Amino acid sequence: MIPLMKNTFLNEFATKRALADFILRSEKLSMGTTCAEFEHQFAQKQERTEAVLFNSGGSANLALLQALKNLGKLKNGDKIGFSALTWSTNVMPIIQMGLIPVPVDCDRNTLNVMAYQLEDRLKEEDLKAFFTTNVLGFAGDLDNIRKLCDNRGILFLEDNCEALGTRLHNGRTGNFGLASTFSFFVAHHMSTIEGGMLCTDSEELAEMLRIVRANGWDRNLTAKQQAGLRKKHGIASEFQAKYTFYDLGYNLRPTEITGFLGIEQLKYLDENIRKRDENHRAIEAYIIQNEDIVNIKHDHIKDLSPFALPIICKSQTLKSKYFEQFSGAGIEIRPVIAGNIQNQPFYHKYCDKSFSLPETDFIHNNGFYCGNYPEMTASDIETIISCII
């Protein structure tokens, strides 16, 4: 069988041995200096000034919207656009925050929202923010989307959980919006078992995110930030500050284990991405020749960091054919993320309005994906190709 992911970590044995040594010598495993060092290294790698580590990518999404509400940049009832082809943890926080979710259609040829589709939605809906999902390592025309959002005064946010390392000709995915979120769950480009990160260039947002992450405390802020908050709120002593809560928050903190694994796996990230790209190119060469399957366009992408291998067939009949071929060959497959998110039970329960999403429906009805990971062998790749030709 060819699974979605073979190992928890790249270079698994060495990572597990290093982790065991770290645990044995550590006096403290709750969030501390190791997490802070991972944040610093990840911010440098992503080329942003701030990185805030969370216990999951979903928590990062939740904290982002809470922080924007705490700062007054969003308020109850605001309409938030999002990629219709996405994961539950991009949409649920919108609902949980008392905001109104508005899906934006995705182009079948890129799997992502394109600027023209966002512009079409803006003819009908007044959006305060747009939260795009960079699907399976691919991306839309993010620079055009950024310009559109800037011109309309719309907050632009990116879920980059599936596209860590992808670079467009004019910048990295995850660096086009005010903030971007990342996931380090097993099977992502790098794994800390559970874990997530949020990157931004806004010091104000990063400060609020650290407050949100830790119950509303100021414990993880700089001394200067603490002094400013305590003066503003009349907190007279360090003793009083211990249990002072400045704004709405949660306990979304990671552990030092998360930080350690992040530092270890960051060492292998470039290798991970290179091997995924090699796998994708080998298989894509045969997809291009197959008229039954949509060839996902990525000519606007300079460096592709594939998360998985999408198979988007041109009809449901063809999908059934290739579904059976992949399954029969022992290749584990999944829907393309959650498909059209409007079809999910939770969405029906909490959202009254539905939108026409023909391109997302096409992907939903005609697509699936299989894994793409560094440990794939030549035999694995040949097996996948045999199901395509």
Image (tube, rainbow, N blue to C red):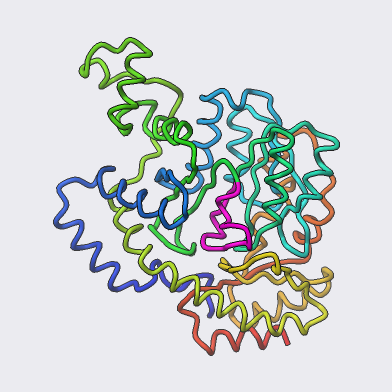
Please determine whether, in this image, residue 217 is positioned above or below residue 28.
above
Q: Quadrant of residue 239?
A: top left
Q: Position of residue 279 (x, y in %)?
A: 56, 80
Left or right of residue 336, residue 185 in this image: left
Residue occupying image coordinates x 70% and y 48%: 83
In which image quadrant can residue 308 be found? bottom right
The residue at 38%/67% (across/down) is 9
Q: In the figure, is residue 207 to the left or right of 371? A: left
Tell me which secondary structure the magenta stretch mostly adopts: loop
87 vs 330: above or below: above
128 lies above or below 9: above
Q: Which residue is at the front of the view, 73 or 12?
A: 73
Does the magenta run of residues contain 164?
A: yes
Instruction: Specify the segment rendered in magenta.
Output: 158-176
Task: Please state which of residues 4 and 22 is positioned toward the viewer in this rendering.
Answer: 22
For the point 80% across and 49% down, the residue is 117
- Residue 172 location in percent, x, y? 56, 57
Which residue lies most toward the front here?
170
- Residue 336: % across, % down: 67, 61
Q: Is residue 185 left or right of residue 178?
A: left
Residue 275, given in percent of the width and then of the height, sits at: 50, 77
In the picture, the quarter occupied by the C terminus is: bottom right
Residue nearest the viewer, comparing 212 with 148: 148
